Structure formats: structure tokens, C-alpha cells
Image (spheres, rainbow, N blue to C red):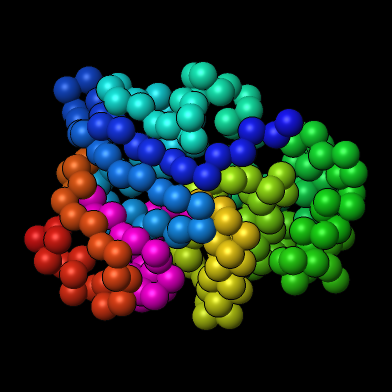
Amino acid sequence: MIYDFRRLAVVDVARHYGRRKALSQVAFTCEAGEIVGLLGPNGAGKSTLLNILATLLTASRGRVEYGDRTAAQGGGEVRARIGMLGHDLFLYPELTARENLIFFAQLYGLPDARAAADAALERAGLADRGDDIVSGFSRGMRQRVALERALLHDPRLVLLDEPFTGLDQASTAALVARLQERREAGCILVIATHDLDVADGLLSRAIYLKNGRVVGTDTDSRGLSERYRIAIQ
């Protein structure tokens, strides 16, 4: 039976690098069907927090609960329900889009890797470019392939670090539509972003971070820019 969780809880999480405190007593919860935004200036701790949620880093103090389990308790079952799109897209530029997706589908242990890759290319709107080398793709096209790579295994928790950077209007709209579809499917999505214009109206909730601490939360994602300015000033 696949472990399936519908709630994510960050409980007083801290992360220290020697004397430097990247995160201090961060606490919040996310529910299935939410898109939660981590908003803050550079150095606020957004990427560190995403890496902890992805189990790539461990917290110095506190814990993250994936339903009724921590990563230490759930191990591979928890990690198998997490998908991440980071600054590094984790695509092999010398391979085609289809070869990339087949490779990752095999890593995820999907029963029919080629069928999963073909379906992902369709969702990305790149079915006609599946046999083209990824190094020849635009940033937006590579981003779409990378997002589908992160979603191949139907994760419960989707983590995205600055996913709109470098995208044109059409690519941004396509990405937003895909994220909304995942929200409607009951996923938990956590997005770190500086792009408040895109986040405005997309987020279910905003969490404002400054110097590694939560300095405010917001359940109204309309008019984010002004409230963000007030929260982090």
C-alpha cells in the first residue's frame, strides 16, 4: 500500500550552519489542495526550508511531519511521495526529452517507463519535441520537462524553488495551469518565489520569511505586493 498523507506540519524547525542561523523556529501546516507560498528576500531561508521539506537536509532542531510520520520514521515511503523542482532542473542536456523522462520513470520504479514519459510529454505540450535533444530547448521548454519529471510518480507533496524565473508569459501561464491542476487533484504544493505578480491570486496562503524566521502569514493572496512589503520591512 502506498503511503499517502494529506497534511504537512513544520514544527519549530531550525537549521544552523555553525553560528549562522539559516532558520529559527519555523512553524506552519499545509493541507491537501493548498498552494502555499514562501515569500522573502534573498537569504531569508526559503531554499533551506524547501530542502528540509524534501529531506535533502535535516533540521538542527524541530521536525517535519508528513501525515503521521517524520522522514526518519517513514524513510523511503515518505520520500517516494515528494516531488521537487529546484534551481537545478536535473535534466541531462545530451539526452532527448523522452530519454530523460524514461530514465527518471525507471528510477521511480514505474511499471511502464516509456508510457509514463509519453504521457508526461503530452501534458507538457511537447509530444512533437520528445525526440529532440534537451540542450536545444528554450528555458521554458526545459522547465516544462523538468516539472513533469518531478510529477512522474504522482507525488503527494510538490516543492518548487523559483519556478517562474526566466519564463515568458506563455510558459508562465502553462506552469500556473499545471500547478492549479495538481492542487485540484489534492496535492500539497509549496512554492518559494520572488514573482509576486504570478503568486498574486495563485496561492492559497503566503508565509513571509525574513532572516530565517516567519514574520507573517496571509490567507488572501490578492494584492500581495503591498502586504509583503509591510511584512518584511
Q: Quadrant of residue 219?
A: bottom left
Which residue: 58% across, 64% down? 184
Query: Does 17 sit above or below residue 136?
Result: above
Inspect this view and state whether residue 164 appears: yes
Q: Position of residue 69 (x, y in %)?
A: 49, 26
Q: Is residue 80 left or right of residue 72?
A: right
Which residue: 61% across, 38% down? 4
Residue 229 part of the magenta segment: no
Stretch of the chain drawn in magenta: 189-209
Q: Position of residue 5 (x, y in %)?
A: 55, 39
Query: Does 101 sit above or below residue 13?
Result: below
Q: Nearer the viewer, residue 92 or 163?
A: 163
In which quadrant is the C terminus drawn? bottom left
Which residue: 40% across, 66% down? 203
In which quadrant is the N terminus drawn? top right
Q: Position of residue 133 (x, y in %)?
A: 79, 57
Q: How many marks?
A: 0
Inspect this view and state whether residue 175 appears: no
Query: Does 81 sit above or below residue 141?
Result: above
Q: Nearer the viewer, residue 158 or 121?
A: 158
Q: Position of residue 206 (x, y in %)?
A: 31, 60
Q: Is residue 213 left or right of residue 196?
A: left
Q: Quadrant of residue 153?
A: top right
Which residue: 34% across, 54% down? 38
Residue 201 part of the magenta segment: yes
